[in-house]
Every structure is written in C-alpha cells, then in structure tokens.
Amino acid sequence: MQKKLFIVFEGIDGSGKSTQAKLLYDYLKQKFSNISFYKFPTHQKTKFGKIIDEYLYGKMGKLEDIPPEIPSLLYALDRYQFKNELEYKKIIICDRYWQSNLAHQAAKLHGKEREKMISWLIHLDERLPKPSHIFLIDVPVEIAYKRIMKEKKMDIHEKNKKYLEEVRKVYLLLAKKYKWNIINGIKNKKEKTKEEIFTEVKNILKV
C-alpha cells in the first residue's frame, strides 16, 4: 500500500456517493485499523457545520441572492478545522471534500466568471491535504432527484433542478480535466446496483 491512501467520493446529491463511501470504509476497516471516515459538510456536528445548515435551509436567503464566495468560505472553514487530522492520518475515506466546492459554487456562474471561480476555489483549499483518489459517481439529475425526494427534506441546492444540472456539468468537466475516476451509475438505461458500482470502485483501487 502507498504511504497515504486518501479517497474522496463526489457527485451530485442523490448520486449514491455517500453509499459508496460508507461501503468502502466498512470494507477497508476489516483490513486496516488506522482508517478514518469524514463527511463534509459536517452539518450539526460542528460549529461551522451548523452555520452551513443555516445557508442550506434558506436562513441566509435564496440561493440566487447569496454571493457564491460566502458559502465557499463557510465550506472551506468546515474542512480546515480538520486540517491537522487529515494531514497525519494514513487511510482516509471522504464523503465529499473540496471538489464539492468547485462544482457547487462554480455552477452558479458562467463563462469566464466560472473559470475564475474554479481557480479561486482551488487556491482557497490548496493548503489542505490532497486526495490520492477521487471518484465521481455520475447519474442523471432526474434519477438523483427522485432519490432525494424519497429520502429527506430538500435543501436550497436540492430543490433546484436547473442548478443541479449545472453542478453535474461542472463535475464532469472537472473530472475529465483533472483525471478523476468517473463511474457511470447507469448501464443500458438502468440504474446499476450499489454492489455493481462498488465492484468497479474496488477494481480501480485494486483492494
């Protein structure tokens, strides 16, 4: 095994990324004792996570009325509070990391402004540890939206289908540009099972 294994799962809400992150964590912790799991944002578990929830559930205003820099900084603060832990731990599984900020905040802008935002966001998180592997679990927004509606109360991101389409576009753009591992959650117009997707993840990681 390489010196540090830092695996991140990304995707739009309802893509199945959280399921895959948990499956991998449960699988690897049977083999390794020094493994840690993180889920970002931290929501009600930390001070910064609670502030993010205020944003997500509309207490700061409507999605279109909030400059993207504000949530960007909040999400970065949420991650940076774990910087020391992320630096010294040997095996880390993350359900979202700073790549989420790139997709979700850049999706609010277009053209040159989108490019500038991505560049700024990369700079914002550059002092955090870098992942060794990034998986993008990709599914169409319609499928993801149906899953979200069944599972929970939707936040201001999840309620907006047009916004989720833009987030997906940015995710795919970034994944291709930075050579992330893209796993298509659909095969022959049918949803893959979580087991099928997990087999692909294990094959890529060779674990």
Image: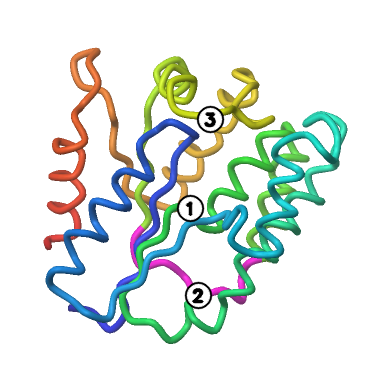
Q: Is residue 40 above or below residue 81?
A: above
> Residue at label 2?
129
Counting from the top left corner in percent of width and height, residue 31 is at 12, 72
Q: In the visual, does 73 lie left or right of 95? A: right
Closer to the eye: label 3 or 2 = 2
Residue 96 has which mark? Answer: 1
Q: Is residue 114 above or below residue 91?
A: above
Closer to the eye: label 2 or 1 = 1
Which type of secondary structure does the marked residue at label 1 adopt?
A: loop
Q: Earlier in the sequence, mark 2 or mark 1?
A: 1
Front residue (pair 34, 163): 34
Q: Is residue 127 magenta?
A: yes
Q: Is residue 63 above or below residue 191?
A: below
Residue 176: quarter of image:
top left
> Residue at label 3?
169
Counting from the top left corner in percent of width and height, residue 94 is at 41, 60
Q: Earlier in the sequence, mark 3 or mark 2?
A: 2
Q: Earlier in the sequence, mark 3 or mark 1?
A: 1
Name the residue located 37 percent from the left edge and 27 percent from the top edge: 139
